[in-house]
Every structure is written in structure tokens, then in C-alpha cells.
Image (cartoon, rainbow, N blue to C red):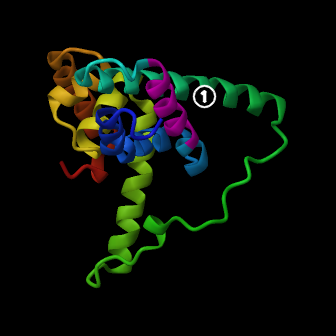
Amino acid sequence: MAGAHPRLDAFLASIERQAYRFALHYTRDRDDALDLVQDAMLRLARRYSDRPDDEYAPLFFGILRNRIRDWQRREIVRSRIFFWQGRGDSTDADPVDTARGPASATPEHRTRNAAAMVALDAALTELPTRQREVFLMRTLDGMDVQSTAAALGIGEGSVKTHHSRAVHRLRTILGEHWDG
């Protein structure tokens, strides 16, 4: 299938990192996130490769969101059935977590940053799904309003509204950790 649709291949290559980060936020497991992204990419290629280029983003992110929701449902069932077993965290060190910071970063600075990231992660779970999706795409992935709207299949005005509400809510939740 690779090479048969060069525009689709280029689209998939252009969004793979942001799709991975998007899935990772929900799964908190690198392997599960990679599986979900790969599955969404395969579904897009198999079912929609003949579509116009401008339809790829909304179709792909719709598929990915649905795959994530399915994964979340399965995880709820698994946790109820196998509640006595742990998830088995990966022992592989995350290169981002183990990377050295700037030489000027003091232990206090690193501790504050770590606490802020934990607080942000917790605060994101308190946002409604659409606000969380928009915030992640706009702020963390750096997508513009138009791209976010196309990816989520909503209007640009809705993207702006959801983002504004998410930022306002996060500012309230994060308090001391909020730096703008």
C-alpha cells in the first residue's frame, strides 16, 4: 500500500507525531498509543485513500478519536475484571524523561516543573473531552485554528470557543502552576 498513494503517505508522515502525542495523552502507554495511531492510519488508508487531500485530517482524527474511545471502554472492562493485576508499567526509560535539562536548571526548578506537569496532566482530565482535544491540538501540538477545526470536524469558531474555555478552566485549576 505504501507508495500507491503518495499524497496520503505524505499526510500520514506529517501527522504521525502529533497523533502519537494525542493518543499517548489518553492511554499513558507508549505501546498502546502507537498501536492506536497505526490502526487509525491503516483504517484511513484502507477506507478513504481515494478521498480528496483536504478530507484526510478530519477523517483521520475522527478515526483516531473513535479508536481511543474503544480502547478506553476496553480498559474499563479490563480494570473491572482484572482489578487485582497491575497494568505492568514498561521498564524502558522514556528518553524525554531521562534527557538532561539545561545546565542552569536547579533541582528546585526541576521539581517545580515536574509538579507543574503533574498538575497539568491532572487538570486536563477535568476538562470536557472536546475542550481537552482542542487544547492539546492547539497548545501542545501547535496546530492552528483551521487545522484543528478540520481535524476535529468542527467550525473554527468552535475551536476558538473550546480553546478559550479550556485555557480559562486550566488557569483556575492550576492556580500557582499557571504561567500563561
Image quadrant in which you'd find residue 59: top left
Extent of the magenta region = 35-47
| In-front residue for pair 65/178 | 65
Position in image of residue 149 (x %, y %): 23, 22
Position in image of residue 81 (x %, y %): 83, 29
User: In the image as oriented, which residue stretches furthest toward the front?
Assistant: 4
Q: Is residue 126 left or right of residue 106?
A: right
User: In the image as oriented, which residue stretches furthest toward the bottom?
Assistant: 103
Q: Residue at x 24, y 28 (%)?
A: 148
| In-front residue for pair 105/48 | 48
Q: Could you say whether the residue bearing mark 1 is in a helix, strand or loop?
A: helix
Please tell me whether the stretch drawn in magenta is mainly helix, strand or loop: helix
Image quadrant in which you'd find residue 169: top left
Few, some or many C-alpha atoms within 10 Å of disc 1 (few <14, some 14-19, many ≥20)?
some
Q: Residue at x 34, y 76 (%)?
A: 101
Residue 172 visible, this angle: no
> Where does label 1 land, which residue?
72
Q: Residue at x 76, y 31 (%)?
A: 78
Q: Residue at x 52, y 64 (%)?
A: 94
Instruction: Give the amino acid at mark 1.
Output: Gln
Residue 105 higher or lower than 131, as above or below: below
Residue 3 visible, this angle: yes
Residue 61 higher or lower than 85, as above or below: above
Q: Is residue 167 left or right of residue 59?
A: left
| Residue 116 located within the stretch drawn in magenta | no
Position in image of residue 116 (x %, y %): 36, 55
Position in image of residue 160 (x %, y %): 16, 24
Q: Is residue 82 left or right of residue 126?
A: right
Q: How many discs mark residues in the rendered view?
A: 1
